[in-house]
Image: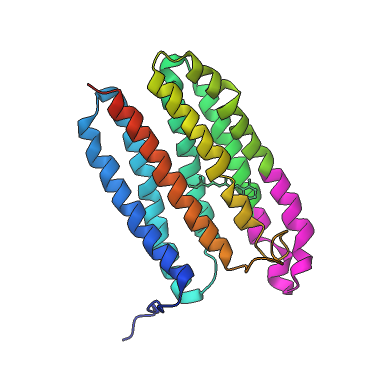
Amino acid sequence: MLLDIQLMRPDDYVGFTFFIGYMAMFAASIFFFFERSRVDDKWKLSLLVSALITGIAAVHYLYMRDYWGVHQESPTFFRYVDWTLTVPLMCVEFYLLTKPAGASRGLMWKLIIASVWMLVAGYIGEAFNPALTSGVASDGTSHSVMWGVISTLGYLYVLHAAWFGEVAQLAEKSDSAVVKKGVRTLAWFVLVGWAIYPIGYMCMPGGWLSSVMDPSMIDVWYNLADAINKIGFGLVVYHIATSESK
Ligand SMILES: *C/C=C(C)/C=C/C=C(C)/C=C/C1=C(C)CCCC1(C)C
């Protein structure tokens, strides 16, 4: 009996980014997990969360790679399941880093709710886009713009918290210069790294960039952004943890 999995063609560059994304996430997870033994106890949970973020992504990438291979179509559902699990965990990282300076559980939950809001609205914008059924790109414009704007409100909340709001203020109060600087670096990830996703979103049929960019580019943008944000974010946490360990 033949397996139903199609082997990747050498010119399938979108498929290749899923392939390499999977390996990178997997390797990063092993790294963060084993490095836990080298840091002080109070940092072990932060490194575990980094390992979980890339580990959860690795499992989804394996699945998305095959989904792409078989259907040559965006694995939108699995993409959003992955993000809905991993982005709240990134919010947990902000909480863990600022907890010694007084961060409350309430702050953690506000960030989690804002990020889930952002992702649920984004999912509605992508998965229920009328252009997908009608085949007419312009049919999707008002739908994708409306849900994109709703989603952006959640994004702005997290961005504001990381730069000016509670997270930034607590980091400022921290007595560790490394934590202060590290939280600022993570805020840059939220500003620059996270901004890549709306670019991908705007490539979908009917999106503002769809006339200038191939809709299949959406997955390349998302895969690139995931690698930067999940692995890079984890490395910043790793740097803080190792610098602050004896
Ligand atoms: C590891 C995955 C991460 C860090 C995913 C982040 C996703 C976003 C910041 C998505 C943002 C979006 C908007 C701000 C508007 C359009 C819809 C989204 C969901 C693509």
102 versus 21 height, above or below: above
Q: Which residues are magenta?
A: 124-151
227 versus 239 height, above or below: below
Q: Quadrant of the N terminus?
A: bottom left
| Left or right side of 171 for 244 | left
In this rendering, the count of numbered labels is 0
Identify the residue at horizontal 59%, vertical 33% (top origin): 158
Identify the residue at horizontal 56%, vertical 42% (top origin): 192
| Location of residue 184 in the rendering, given as x and y in whole percent from the top left corner | 49, 28
| Left or right side of 222 for 143 | right
Residue 133 on the magenta span:
yes
Identify the residue at horizontal 55%, vertical 29% (top origin): 162
| Location of residue 120 in the rendering, given as x and y in whole percent from the top left corner | 61, 48
173 versus 74 height, above or below: above
Identify the residue at horizontal 32%, vertical 48% (top origin): 28
Q: Quadrant of the C terminus?
A: top left
| Left or right side of 86 for 215 | right
Query: Which scheme is used to colour this image of the protein?
Result: rainbow
| Location of residue 2 in the rendering, given as x and y in whole percent from the top left corner | 33, 85
| Location of residue 51 in the rendering, given as x and y in whole percent from the top left corner | 33, 42
| Most common secondary structure along the magenta stretch | helix
Residue 65 image-quadrant placement:
bottom left
86 versus 217 height, above or below: above
Residue 50 on the magenta span:
no
